[in-house]
Image (tube, grey):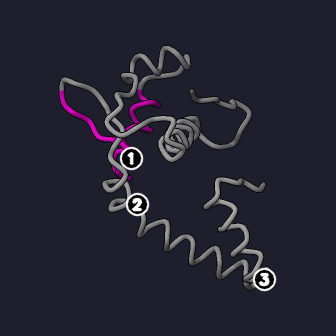
Amino acid sequence: MIQLNYRDSKPIYEQIKDGLRKLVISNSLSADEKLPSVRELAAKLAINPNTIQKAYRDLESEGYIYTVTGKGTFVAERKEVYDARAKELLTEFDEIVEELFFLSVKEKELVERMDNLAEGKVDQ
């Protein structure tokens, strides 16, 4: 499910957040699918439950997941994620593209990369 790298400088809760976000984006987790409880995931990853709770809280504020009291935590519908996160990501995208243009990356290269991503081809 989620791979943690204890040597990475990125905090564990961010690694968990990024891992779950990627699972949602790749449709490995579908809308309304129940996530493991904080305690279950903490036990599975052998980390403090507060770390999982922080990742879940951040993902919920970004709109990727939602909590039903007494029932658990679930993956949000795509539209809910879009409404909560798209504007923020588009602002980041604009800033990154602006910097790439400053670094003389050509528009054609950026368009090709976006087309590849749209087709499911990932370049690193």
- The residue that mark 1 highlights is 64
Residue furthest to the left = 69
Residue furthest to the front = 119
| Percent coordinates x, y for residue 45 in the rendering | 55, 20
Residue 94 left/right relative to 31: right
Q: Secondary structure at mark 2?
A: helix
Label 1 with label 2: CB-CB less than 8 Å: yes
Q: Amino acid at mark 3?
A: Lys
Q: Nearer the viewer, mark 3 or mark 2?
A: 3
Q: Amino acid at mark 2?
A: Arg
- The residue that mark 2 highlights is 85
| Percent coordinates x, y for residue 98 in the rendering | 65, 82
Residue 88 left/right relative to 70: right
Q: Quadrant of the N terminus?
A: top right
Residue drawn where x is 64% and y is 43% of the image: 10
Q: Is residue 112 magenta?
A: no
